[in-house]
Image: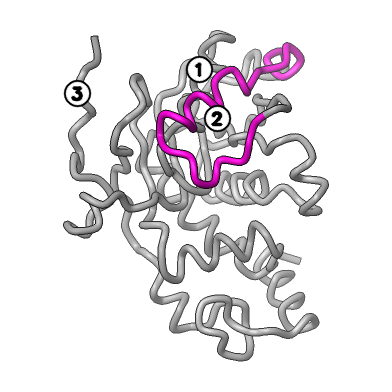
């Protein structure tokens, strides 16, 4: 049974309604599904962490997309994984050409057990199946002791996450001989601190990251006025001495 058929069956068995508009039926009604973004844009955070690889996201973290991501992550709504993986696959294709190794940002210790699933790893695996030449390489692990990021500013998030990820030698051993350009994947780009820490940990193990890809990116105040994901659009962030 395909992922989509399985998810549809679970929706029918469990009942419920659209996570965005509450209309009875599927977890994402046709109208709300049609409201999902169709393009991909550069998603440079403001301010941008120095050295961040080019970031791409399928859409802004609001409206239907925000509701779908939250429901998939926190409530494990089965029918949302398919459409969200399609969006991530689009961002991956824009980020780099294959062959690709997709490295998901690791969950915090205990988070997967508490949720009963690893939502990002699920999305990355599905997205890899939609991108020619892409494979999943879960190289990173997260250390304990990281505080909740909610309410933290860009600098506070960077300080909180510094040194929080690492790459086990056994994961690197499995990577040996698997040629591919490395793209770090996440569900949402906020300040870029998480992605930059993932990039640092991989770089410390000799793995170069060429780009980062996400389903969505938060709108900064300057961005919200223009309706774009980033005021820099295709331009890279300014060099930092």
Image quadrant where one finds the N terminus: bottom right
Rendered residue at 65%/13% (across/down):
176
Nearer to us in this view, 174 or 14: 14
| Tags 2 and 3 touching, CB below 8 Å | no
Residue identifier under label 2: 101
How far apart in space, not on screen, are marks 1 and 3 (Cα)?
19 Å
Q: Residues within 10 Å of mark 2 (few under 14, many from 20)?
A: many
Per the image, the residue denoted by label 1 is 200
Q: Residue at x 69, y 84 (%)?
A: 16
Mark 2 or mark 3, earlier in chain = 2
Which residue lies under the disc numbered 3? 238
Q: Which of pointers 1 and 2 indicates the residue nearer the eye?
A: 1
Sooner in the amino-acid sequence: mark 1 or mark 2: 2
Q: Is residue 95 left or right of residue 114?
A: left
Q: Position of residue 52 (x, y in %)?
A: 37, 25
Secondary element under disc 1, as helix, strand or loop, is helix
């Amino acid at each position: 049974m395909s992922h989509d058929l399985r998810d549809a069956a679970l929706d029918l068995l469990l009942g419920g309604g659209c996570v965005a508009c509450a209309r009875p039926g599927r977890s994402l009604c046709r109208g709300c599904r049609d409201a999902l973004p169709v393009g991909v844009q550069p998603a440079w955070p403001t301010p941008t962490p120095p050295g961040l690889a080019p970031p791409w996201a399928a859409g802004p973290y609001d409206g239907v997309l925000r509701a779908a991501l939250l429901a998939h992550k926190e409530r494990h709504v089965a029918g949302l994984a398919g459409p969200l993986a399609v969006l991530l696959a689009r961002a991956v294709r824009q980020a780099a050409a294959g062959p690709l190794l997709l490295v998901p940002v690791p969950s915090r210790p205990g988070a997967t057990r508490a949720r009963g699933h690893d939502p990002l790893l699920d999305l990355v695996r599905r997205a890899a199946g939609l991108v020619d030449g892409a494979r999943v390489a879960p190289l990173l692990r997260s250390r304990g002791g990281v505080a909740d990021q909610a309410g933290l500013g860009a600098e506070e998030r960077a300080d909180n996450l510094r040194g929080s990820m690492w790459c086990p030698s056994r994961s690197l051993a499995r990577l040996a001989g698997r040629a591919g350009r490395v793209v770090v994947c996440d569900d949402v780009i906020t300040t870029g601190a998480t992605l930059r820490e993932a990039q640092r940990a991989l770089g410390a193990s000799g793995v170069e990251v060429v780009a980062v890809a996400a389903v969505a990116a938060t709108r900064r105040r300057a961005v919200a006025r223009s309706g774009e994901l980033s005021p820099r659009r295709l331009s890279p962030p300014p060099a930092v001495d």
